[in-house]
Amino acid sequence: MRTASKRPGAGFASVLPSLPRDVILKGDCIPMMEKLPAKSVDLIFADPPYNLQLQGDLHRPDQSRVDAVDDAWDQFSDFAAYDAFTRAWLLSARRVLKPDGGLWVIGSYHNIFRLGTILQDLGFWILNDIVWRKTNPMPNFRGRRFANAHETLIWAAPSPKAKRYTFNYDALKAFNDDLQMRSDWTLPICTGEERLKDDTGRKVHPTQKPESLLYRVLLSTTKPGETVLDPFFGTGTTGAVAKKLGRHFIGIEREQSYIDAAEARIEAVRPADAPALSVVQGKRAQPRIPFGTLLEAGLVKPGERLYDPKGRLSALVRADASLIYEKDGRRHEGSIHRVGAAVQGLEACNGWVFWHMRTKEGLKPIDCLRDTVRGALAA
Amino acid sequence: MRTASKRPGAGFASVLPSLPRDVILKGDCIPMMEKLPAKSVDLIFADPPYNLQLQGDLHRPDQSRVDAVDDAWDQFSDFAAYDAFTRAWLLSARRVLKPDGGLWVIGSYHNIFRLGTILQDLGFWILNDIVWRKTNPMPNFRGRRFANAHETLIWAAPSPKAKRYTFNYDALKAFNDDLQMRSDWTLPICTGEERLKDDTGRKVHPTQKPESLLYRVLLSTTKPGETVLDPFFGTGTTGAVAKKLGRHFIGIEREQSYIDAAEARIEAVRPADAPALSVVQGKRAQPRIPFGTLLEAGLVKPGERLYDPKGRLSALVRADASLIYEKDGRRHEGSIHRVGAAVQGLEACNGWVFWHMRTKEGLKPIDCLRDTVRGALAA
DNA sequence: GGCGCTTCTGAATCAGAGG
DNA sequence: CCCTCTGATTCAGAAGCGC
């Protein structure tokens, strides 16, 4: 891992010719992202500052808390600065993001509504909001509110027309004991061994995110070998999990102390082996086998009959892999899907699971034959 | 209960001298709220249109069509129109609200970020965002996103200096088995007997909220005898729960069919019959521990092997918590349960007790690790 | 009545390749 | 870009039905 330091007069001259990978770039995220080639990153995970009062960039001119806090204009001026910052880094981020990439942001009620609104205003397309339920949140000590036991993430595509974003649906379903993954994730906060401490035992970063959270983010919305950018890298949770999962990372961070901690931490990570990184693939990922292939392979012969699941209706297979169904003067012909839909009076039908062959063991869906063909292709 | 109808030229002449209570006002919420005296209401609960932007029809895998929320009242031309509407009704609402009153809004990711941003811009002070985790949400039928399993509520005071808002901390804590009430509430959606149906058996309102949700809202942030205003009354869940809990209500609603249903419903409420309301309590809602959680927690690592009870067969653990088994040309992949079933030639298998890890003390079922995680979660 | 099986439904921004 | 066609995709709970 390398660290590219941006010193005065010593930064990148202009946009880099190619994407650096597995590096931490030192500096503010907006100028740094401007150095990266456009449409080059597969995923962005951002954990931006929550409290604008503590950020140098966002400091109000007079540093003071407004006396008349019910003054709407003053309220707005604070939020306006945060909004301007948010808009700026999100625009930079989208330039770097591939058109079919994904973007995650995390926040609390202090900033997440502004993040979400600006995402929508900029034309990002929200795919889900995700709730991180903390199993061990900080209690509310004064007893004046509900215990703040969650944070919110937003997962978005860069535009509404981006339909080919990565979502490892089947992997997540396997991960979750064969139930599809929900929008609420129950995970502990970062404590114990995982929490980075300095020599004096104090935590290195005030809001270090748990690796489990990033694990789920990267597992669900990236593929092995892809690159994830984290513009607010902190102590490098994103980088550590990316390395562990065989993904590449680019971190951007201003504070040298965080960079030092992140480098040591990521250095110590041992990535999993390639076989362990492959995930369950659904049917969509498998090579398409048209019905005609079964005829070419001799697994189905022209003139055979296919049956509905109960064996009552049947249709004739023709040489061109179309079916013909005739009964009581009704007549349908076409693909296995069209005829399947027609005989059921439905709009659509998956002919692969509707139509069955008669075998010694009874009726078997023709979908089984596809597996046979796929096996033959693989061998 | 009375219904005040606003007919052309027959509405209230101007602002009412006193607050009507336990009534449903027919009409648009903004002009209706303008008739109410300023600073007169203790709490506002608002379930505004969500501004869903649905494309075509959605079908379940069994081809049945999902009954979408395509009502006219949820149609807005763009975000600007929705924002203007939101700003307007929130301003009207704040005028009516007592300075130490509270305001709740509920929404999904389609609108909640805009609601939150506008609340902040208008100078409301957010006290909590609350997540309603649905025990029985609609699944994601196309497998392209996480199942949308929650909605978000925002609880806010009308200004940052309002410190004397009502919060029944101790009541909530008792309600929650002496644990502080958290910001995530696990409750089922409104179904069964509670869901209002018309003569033909169709739901009266597309988005009726469960009484359990309002029960928790009113119990936590109002006192008996206080008045709660609901500007988007619908079929009157707020009114029904208010009556049940000895609070007064004012509902505002445009649709006569909803008003009729609400009146009959509220009429039938007996205030005495206290909480027969089944709510899923925090402590009893033991989190399910999917196998993936063990990987996130680092208790199992991608690339490790799991063994059958006799240690003869073994399978590789992958990053998505799926297993892969390969022997003599046979190959199975999927969840611990699927692969466990496949290697035994069974229909089903409990992977938690079938698969074992090698430890110094010999083979141990992975189920033991679940206890470890549960312990960590409880701590 | 009881049990088991089937059917139905819920605030949803829900496909992708090929021609 | 538009149109056509293939064929992938669901969980919890209530209600209804049949034995």
Image: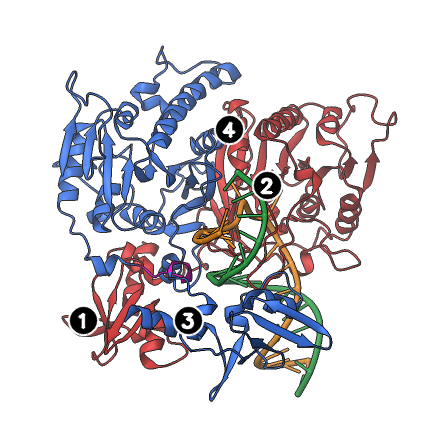
Chain colours: A blue, B red, C orange, D green
For discs 3 and 4, the disc positioned in front in the rendered view = 3
Query: Which residue corresponds to mark 2?
Result: B52
Residue most extreme to the front: A319
The chain letter under disc 1 is B
Label 4: few (<14), some or many (≥20) within 10 Å?
A: many
Above or below, B86 relative to A270: above
Q: Quadrant of residue A150?
A: top left
Asked if residue A253 lies in the magenta stretch, the reply is no
Identify which residue, A112 or A70, lies in the foreground: A112
For discs 3 and 2, the disc positioned in front in the rendered view = 3
Q: CA distance from mark 4 to mark 1?
A: 53 Å
- Residue drawn at 88 percent across, 27 percent down: B10
Q: CA distance from mark 3 to mark 1?
A: 38 Å
Query: Which residue corresponds to mark 3?
Result: A370
The chain letter under disc 2 is B
SS at circle 2? loop
The x, y position of residue A232, in whole percent, is: 28, 32
Q: CA distance from mark 3 to mark 2?
A: 40 Å
- Closer to the chain start, of discs 4 and 1, is 4
- Residue drawn at 41 percent across, 19 percent down: A81
The chain letter under disc 4 is B
Q: Are marks 1 and 2 in contact (CB under 8 Å)?
A: no
SS at circle 1? strand
Q: Are marks 3 and 2 in contact (CB under 8 Å)?
A: no
Q: Name the mark on residue B358.
A: 1
For discs 3 and 1, the disc positioned in front in the rendered view = 3
Quadrant, the C terminus of chain B: bottom left
Q: Name the mark on residue B117.
A: 4
Q: Is residue A123 left or right of residue B266?
A: left
